[in-house]
Image (spheres, rainbow, N blue to C red):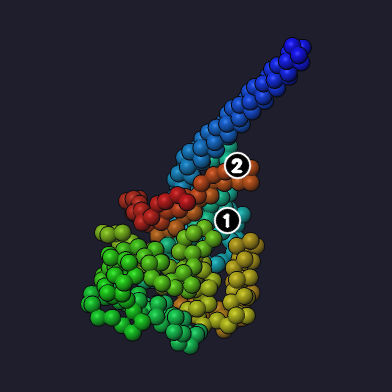
């Protein structure tokens, strides 16, 4: 009986030792995994911090390149193929690559006076789609927008004033004065259905609303900086014409083929009437420091360049 008891005790000791070894192995593996994760997280954070500085450096470099291009080339008409091999920096959406340190940074320059203008007391005038018959949902959205910016408390048919916002659980709307930010459009139901943000999350169909005390961004929208869908809406293009325009822009940005070479005369004339092909002097600059191998940040800034005394007015500056 005594021998059997010793054998059982030896078996329990063996199991206990094996359990302890398994626990220690799991703890060691967990510690290694946590250490590796922390190291990777630190590397990613450091890379993003470094890329933010590189993006700002690239932004300053682009501003210098723009000023240099403007000093050498007084004619700022867009859409003409360059007769020289010199790289031009124009607000036509052309993709540029510059080296900042050891990182290749992607740059695009657009004109900030682009898209639909929803500033002022009557923004809905710019948002009516002439190609469509009256649609109940769209008319409701436009009525909500009109009520949002007007100063009275009268509710338009399908619109929303204080009682409707309170019923929806929103106690601080409407603004009852002109919009301060274009993104306020998304506080209205159905806005995203008609004017969704671009792939980068920016509401590019709508023109930037200047901060207080900065000069307004008024004038005809720039042809090369306005989304194709907005151009098609404003020019009442057919789906086939819109597709041709999209392909024509692609050929311009990749092969520098002028739009007129790939569009019917009827479409070209509509573009000339409704859009400007000259720079306004206010630029929307997009910087992308990311690559397939390295994470990075994107930087977007809207800047007015005044060449006389060379000073800058920043309308927008943000990372995304």
Classify 10 Å Cα crowding around label 1: few (below 14), some (14-19), many (20 and above).
few
Observer-nearest residue: 141 or 249?
141
Observer-nearest residue: 13 or 90?
13
Tell me how far mark 2 sits from mark 1, CA to CA. Answer: 19 Å
The residue at the far bottom in this view is 133
Observer-nearest residue: 159 or 303?
159
Q: Secondary structure at mark 2?
A: loop
The residue beneath circle 2 is 294
Is residue 242 shown left or right of residue 132? Answer: right
Q: Is residue 3 above or below residue 161?
A: above
Classify 10 Å Cα crowding around label 2: few (below 14), some (14-19), many (20 and above).
few
Q: Is residue 106 above or below residue 246?
A: above
For the point 38% across and 78% down, the residue is 142
> Which of labels 2 and 1 is toward the front?
2
Q: Quadrant of residue 1?
A: top right
Q: Is residue 77 visible?
A: no
Is residue 179 shown left or right of residue 31? Answer: left
Is residue 31 shown left or right of residue 298? Answer: right
For the point 36% across and 56% down, the residue is 315
The residue beneath circle 1 is 95
Q: Position of residue 229 (x, y in %)?
A: 53, 73
Q: Which mark is residue 16?
A: none
């Amino acid at each position: 009986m005594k021998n059997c008891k010793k054998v059982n005790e030896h078996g329990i000791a063996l199991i206990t030792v094996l359990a302890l070894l398994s626990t220690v192995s799991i703890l060691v593996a967990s510690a290694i995994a946590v250490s590796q994760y922390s190291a990777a997280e630190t590397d990613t954070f450091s890379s993003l911090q470094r890329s933010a500085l590189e993006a700002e450096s690239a932004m300053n470099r682009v501003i210098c390149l723009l000023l240099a291009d403007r000093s050498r080339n007084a004619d700022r008409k867009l859409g003409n193929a360059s007769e020289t091999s010199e790289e031009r920096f124009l607000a036509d959406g052309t993709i540029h690559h510059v080296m900042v340190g050891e990182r290749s940074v992607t740059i695009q320059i657009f004109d900030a006076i682009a898209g639909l203008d929803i500033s002022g007391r009557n923004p809905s005038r710019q948002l009516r789609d002439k190609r469509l018959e009256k649609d109940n949902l769209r008319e409701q959205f436009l009525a909500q927008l009109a009520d949002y910016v007007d100063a009275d408390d009268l509710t338009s048919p399908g619109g929303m004033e204080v009682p409707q916002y309170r019923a929806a659980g929103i106690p601080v709307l409407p603004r009852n004065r002109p919009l301060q930010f274009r993104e306020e459009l998304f506080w209205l139901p159905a806005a995203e259905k008609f004017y969704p943000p671009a792939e980068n999350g920016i509401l590019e169909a709508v023109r930037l609303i200047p901060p207080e005390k900065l000069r307004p961004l008024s004038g005809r929208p720039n042809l090369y900086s306005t989304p194709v869908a907005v151009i098609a809406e404003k020019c009442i293009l057919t789906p086939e014409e819109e597709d041709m325009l999209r392909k024509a822009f692609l050929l311009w940005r990749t092969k520098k083929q002028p739009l007129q070479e790939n569009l019917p005369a009827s479409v070209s004339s509509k573009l000339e009437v409704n859009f400007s092909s000259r720079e306004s002097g206010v630029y929307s600059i997009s910087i992308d420091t990311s690559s397939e191998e390295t994470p990075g940040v994107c930087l977007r800034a809207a800047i007015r360049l005044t060449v006389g005394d060379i000073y800058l007015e920043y309308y927008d500056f943000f990372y995304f």
